[in-house]
Image: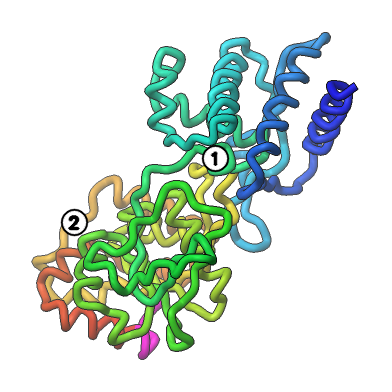
Amino acid sequence: MEDEDAESKCLSWLDAMNFKETEEFVAVDVFIEQREVVSRIEALVLVLLNARERLGLDVVSRSLKNSAVSKSQTVRLRSHQKLVHRPQAIAEILKVLAFVHALLQERKHVTQRDIYYCLIKDFRSQGHLNRTIQECVCLLHCSRMAMNISTTNRGFVAGCLLWEEDMDLQGVDCRALGCQGYAIPGMLSSDLKLRRTSADVRAIVVVEKDSVFQQLCESRLWEILPCILITGCGFPDAATRIVLWKIVSENPELVVYGLVDHNPFGVSILMTYKHGSRMMGLDMFQFTVPIAWLGLHASDKNDSTLSLPLSERDIALKETLLSTPMVPQAWKEELTAMKRKTELQAVYNAFTAVSNVSEIARKIISKRYI
């Protein structure tokens, strides 16, 4: 009788996941209990075992044609599904689901790289495994974090922020951590609280390069301009984007400013924070924030010896960005005028730390951003 009840619950969850062919967008559960994810895995296996007419899995399509821009201007996936019917593909999905099921039962956490080395005989490359994990995200409608799959921590945060994961503890004051700041863990707690240290804090400065981030930490930018600093060390990983989103969600009066290289890839990084990325998966679409382009701009480069010609890759990406409707018009005008590129650290290394910090504060106060 208990088995019948369990089967009934599993099938009712699967019925709820059977989307109609509409333009509605797909959502996933980011922070849910482990036993719920275990139940979803068992439900899928049960359906496959009971399959009589065909062996296959209906998975939300992650193709470019199935992605679109929502009313909130984020990159989303529609609910259109594809049928995974190749025995090899189904076997690969089941291998990952079995691995995740064991992880959850043992309450362990691993990275995607760890999984690859454990299943290296079954997957020809890391990319092959990552795509299969994304298929599992689409099937289970839960995030990688909910499956106890963490990202390799790459981001850092510093400045006027209190990081609290347990309300019984004092938390971490990110002003007191030296030049590297606080390393954002790849697995975030569902009870994580992120609070600004005072009501004077009005800005978050997102920095592309970790070397510039460290320089700003050493100069204690937040003592001149009360702010929070964050870096994803290039294109942000999932945990960095979630942390930035949580800070803004819990402190909606804060304004986010982006400090990136003066090249098309710098703009692409800003767009990832602002609108999301289809490549980052179904579980990341909601973690977007409004962001202003603080620099670098053409007007910030007084020394032409610091710049280089745009490469063919740069030019191709520039043309793509100029043809993308979501890119703000003011950003397109800056891109159109971009004939050469300049890296952030080249400009910041050419001046003293004091002048760099003062210039950032002046640009924000005088609203010299786009």
Residue 309 image label: 2
Q: Is residue 366 part of the magenta span, yes or no?
A: yes
Residue placed at 56% from the left, 76% from the top? 252
Closer to the camera in the image, 267 or 140: 140
Q: Residues within 10 Å of mark 1 (few under 14, many from 20)?
A: many
Residue located beneath label 1 in the image: 144
Closer to the camera in the image, 294 or 143: 143
Q: Secondary structure at mark 1?
A: loop
Amino acid type at mark 1: Arg
Residue placed at 29% from the left, 84% from the top? 223
Specify the color scheme: rainbow
Residue placed at 49% from the left, 73% from the top? 195
Residue placed at 45% from the left, 73% from the top? 256
In the image, taking residue 26 as reference, residue 335 lies left or right, namely: left
The magenta segment is: 364-370
Q: Residues within 10 Å of mark 2 (few under 14, many from 20)?
A: few
Closer to the camera in the image, 200 or 348: 200
| Residue 335 in view (yes/no) | no
In the image, taking residue 215 as reference, residue 60 lies left or right, namely: right
Q: Marks 1 and 2, how far apart in space? A: 40 Å
Residue that sits furthest to the front in the current view: 168
